[in-house]
Each structure stands twice: as structure tokens, then as C-alpha cells.
Image: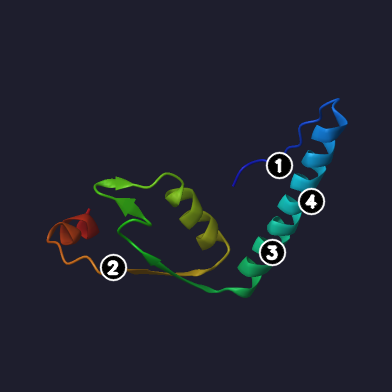
Amino acid sequence: MTDDFLLVHSDSEKKTKQTELMTKFLKEKEEIKQFLNNTDNFFLDLDGVVWRGKEVIEGVKETLEFLRKKNKNLFFITSTTKKNFIKKKNQ
């Protein structure tokens, strides 16, 4: 997750837009908190969600660590039938 911030401009139109965006952000942030508090199990597809090709997708490691610290159950699923999947699993 990113740090919370608010840019302030002298232009009143920009201030109004920023206030609207901040209100929306705070509402979404509260909805995310509520979702996390009410959800214990996360089913994650591996290919395209956890990694793409041979690379782990940016932010996945931190997200998984965050969910584990919150004592969430993580289940990894895939429909990939490639032999390379077995190699990745064992790495």
C-alpha cells in the first residue's frame, strides 16, 4: 500500500477536485478495511496474478506478507498444465 497524501493548490477548482478525490479515497480505504476484516480466505491464481512468465509480479511479495500477518488463509490455484509449473513450485 502507498502512503496517504494530499496535495494542496491555491486554485480553488483544484482544491474542490482534490477534496472529492480524497473523500472517494477514504471511502474506498474504509471499504478495503471492511473487506479485509470480513474475509479470511484468499484464493489466488498463480499465472498472471502471482507471477507472469518467470517473474513474480511487482507488489505480490509484500501483499502476501501483509495478508499472512493478518492471519489470512492463502490458497494458490492454477489452471496451468505446463511442466515449468513443477519447476517453479520446487524453487
Q: Earlier in the sequence, mark 3 or mark 4?
A: 4
Q: Nearer the viewer, residue 63 or 29?
A: 29
Distance between the Cα atoms at labels 2 and 3? 28 Å
Which is in the foreground here, disc 4 or disc 1? 4
Distance between the Cα atoms at labels 1 and 2? 34 Å
Which residue position holds label 3? 31
Look at the numbered disc 4 and give the secondary structure of its residue.
helix
Q: What colour scheme governs how the chains and residues are painted in the rendered image of this protein?
A: rainbow
Which residue position holds label 4? 23
Q: Earlier in the sequence, mark 1 or mark 3?
A: 1
Q: Is residue 2 left or right of residue 86?
A: right
Type of the residue with mark 2: Thr
Type of the residue with mark 3: Glu
Which residue position holds label 1? 4
Q: Is residue 74 left or right of residue 35?
A: left
Q: Earlier in the sequence, mark 2 or mark 3?
A: 3
Look at the numbered disc 2 and give the secondary structure of its residue.
loop
The residue positioned 74% from the left and 46% from the top of the image is 21
- The percent coordinates of residue 17 (x first, y second) are 78, 40
Type of the residue with mark 4: Thr
The residue positioned 84% from the left and 27% from the top of the image is 11
Look at the numbered disc 1 and give the secondary structure of its residue.
loop
- The percent coordinates of residue 23 (x first, y second) are 79, 51
Which residue position holds label 2? 78
Query: Badges 2 and 3: C-beta atoms under 8 Å apart?
Result: no
CA neighbours of label 1 inside 10 A, class few (<14), some (14 to 19), many (20+): few
Q: Earlier in the sequence, mark 2 or mark 4?
A: 4
Distance between the Cα atoms at labels 1 and 3? 16 Å
Q: Earlier in the sequence, mark 4 or mark 1?
A: 1
Question: In which quarter of the view is residue 86 placed?
Answer: bottom left
